[in-house]
């Protein structure tokens, strides 16, 4: 079984084929129950021909972790009942033109962070107040009740409210797939061990480069690089899935540099690298906007270049022992904006928004009832799109919004 130097394991070859066959058999069995013997093949065939399907180009290897097989961290593992039901719901949504079902919720559990990343969507609206723990617990339950399966515990820096994180996991760890999004600040090895015992699925560590000087320059504090490295090791040693969240610089658009970064993160134990192009978050203040001049938003060519590198990382044999790299924007241009449909974001002020880069609010968890908010999510869809989605949709599909 191929693995990188850190021990992250991948299923390839005949083993991967057997996993795929078993998955397709289970999917078809459930599809027949839902659509009928003759309807199931027709619905599935129609779905895979539509560019809005979420299957895309499957990777040449699966991440194997504790007996489960993962393709992408935002979705449940292959063969899980959660993924099979979500896929069949999505078949109905895509084939009928209806809205899809929720899958991912980003919950801001902390408003503060010691780092000063110019691109951070939470820093752009930083507040000194914290959302009360009882309301965070109620909101987590409401997200899960609304169909969310994958919950990102974010911030600010969630490690600054580690007791709240632990209480959320204590209450709901068995109901969903929870990821901690962290810089690694103040996290000790025993913290990762306890979080794993409480049901945490994995950790996404913020790291934009293998250069310590670059990471510390971007984050504005010394030891930021060492904190990230320590978090990767702590997550690995605790038996958690590890992903790297990276806001990509233009240097990484060179294949040699990109491959070197994936090699470095693989040695740390990463199974995935989530690659995010630089974007301007809403509500950015003047000083933060100036700082973004060092890494301004990508051009269409740069978006396509990053997407091509990520596709190569998942498919080429030359990359077979490296983490799976993903970037969302080109795929989402074909799918259509997923904010408010598959994704919800609860920001540090309590506003429930379609995504971190859209300003529309379905309501606020500190002032509105959760029933009202989730009724708005279901019945009052937004029509806001970020500049990136508009740019790529126009370029790739002639401004034909899906």
Image: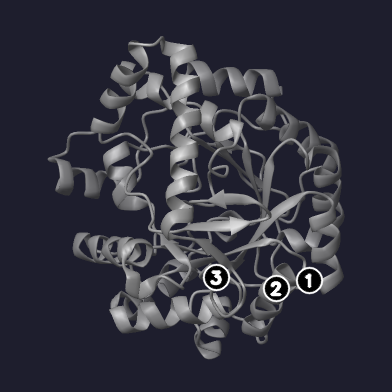
Q: Crowding near pointer 1: few (<14 within 10 Å), some, many (20+)? A: some
Residue furthest out toward the left: 398
> How is colour applied across the structure in the image?
one colour
Depth check: give the residue in front, 329 or 366.
Answer: 329
Query: Where does residue 30 sit, x and y in percent of width and height?
Result: 50, 21
Residue placed at 66% from the left, 48% from the top? 348
Instruction: Note whether residue 341 is visible.
Output: no
Residue placed at 79% from the left, 65% from the top? 192
* Secondary structure state at the residue bearing disc 3: loop
Distance CA(mark 1)–CA(mark 3): 19 Å
Query: Where does residue 269 sit, x and y in percent of width and height?
Result: 61, 73
150 w.r.t. 304: above or below:
above
Q: Is residue 143 left or right of residue 402?
A: right
Q: Earlier in the sequence, mark 1 or mark 2?
A: 1
Classify residue 28 by image quadrant: top left
Q: Is residue 222 left or right of residue 141?
A: left
Picture disc at residue 117? 3
Q: Earlier in the sequence, mark 1 or mark 3?
A: 3
* Secondary structure state at the residue bearing disc 2: helix
Classify residue 307 by image quadrant: bottom left
Distance CA(mark 1)–CA(mark 2): 7 Å
323 w.r.t. 91: above or below:
below
86 w.r.t. 73: above or below:
above
Residue placed at 36% from the left, 38% from the top? 337
Q: Quadrant of the C terminus?
A: top left
Picture disc at residue 187? 1
Badge nearest the viewer, 1 or 3: 1
Picture disc at residue 231? 2
């Amino acid at each position: 079984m191929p693995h990188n130097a850190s021990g992250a394991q991948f299923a390839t070859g005949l083993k991967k084929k057997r996993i795929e066959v078993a998955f397709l058999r289970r999917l078809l069995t459930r599809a027949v129950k839902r659509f009928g013997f003759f309807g199931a093949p027709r619905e599935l065939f129609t779905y895979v021909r539509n560019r809005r399907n979420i299957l895309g180009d499957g990777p040449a290897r699966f991440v194997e972790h504790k007996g489960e097989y993962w393709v992408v961290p935002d979705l449940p593992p292959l063969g899980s009942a959660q993924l099979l039901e979500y896929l069949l719901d999505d078949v109905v949504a895509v084939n009928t033109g209806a809205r899809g079902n929720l899958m991912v919720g980003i919950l801001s559990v902390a408003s503060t962070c010691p780092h000063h990343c110019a691109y951070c969507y939470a820093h752009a609206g930083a507040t000194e107040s914290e959302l009360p723990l009882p309301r965070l617990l109620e909101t987590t339950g409401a997200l899960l009740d609304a169909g969310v399966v994958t919950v990102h515990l974010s911030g600010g820096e969630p490690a600054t409210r580690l007791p709240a994180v632990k209480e959320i996991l204590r209450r709901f760890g068995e109901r969903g797939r929870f990821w901690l999004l962290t810089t690694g600040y103040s996290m000790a090895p025993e913290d990762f061990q306890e979080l794993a015992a409480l049901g945490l699925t994995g950790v996404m560590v913020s790291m934009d480069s293998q250069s310590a000087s670059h990471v510390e320059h971007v984050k504005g504090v010394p030891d930021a690089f060492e904190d990230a490295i320590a978090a990767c090791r702590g997550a690995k040693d605790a038996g958690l899935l590890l992903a790297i969240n990276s806001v990509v610089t233009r240097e990484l658009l060179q294949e040699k540099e990109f491959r070197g970064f994936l090699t470095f993160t693989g040695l740390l134990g990463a199974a995935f690298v989530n690659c995010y192009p630089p974007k301007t978050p809403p509500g950015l203040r003047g000083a933060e906007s100036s700082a973004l001049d060092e890494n301004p938003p990508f051009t269409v060519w740069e978006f396509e270049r990053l997407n091509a590198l990520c596709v190569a990382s998942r498919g080429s044999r030359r990359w077979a022992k490296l983490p799976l790299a993903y970037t969302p924007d080109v795929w989402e241009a074909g799918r259509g904006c997923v904010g408010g449909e598959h994704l919800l974001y609860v920001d540090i002020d309590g506003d429930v928004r379609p995504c971190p880069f859209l300003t529309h609010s379905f309501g606020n968890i500190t002032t509105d009832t959760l029933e009202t908010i989730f009724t708005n999510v279901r019945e009052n869809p937004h029509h806001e799109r970020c500049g990136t989605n508009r740019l790529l949709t126009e370029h790739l599909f002639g401004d034909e919004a899906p």
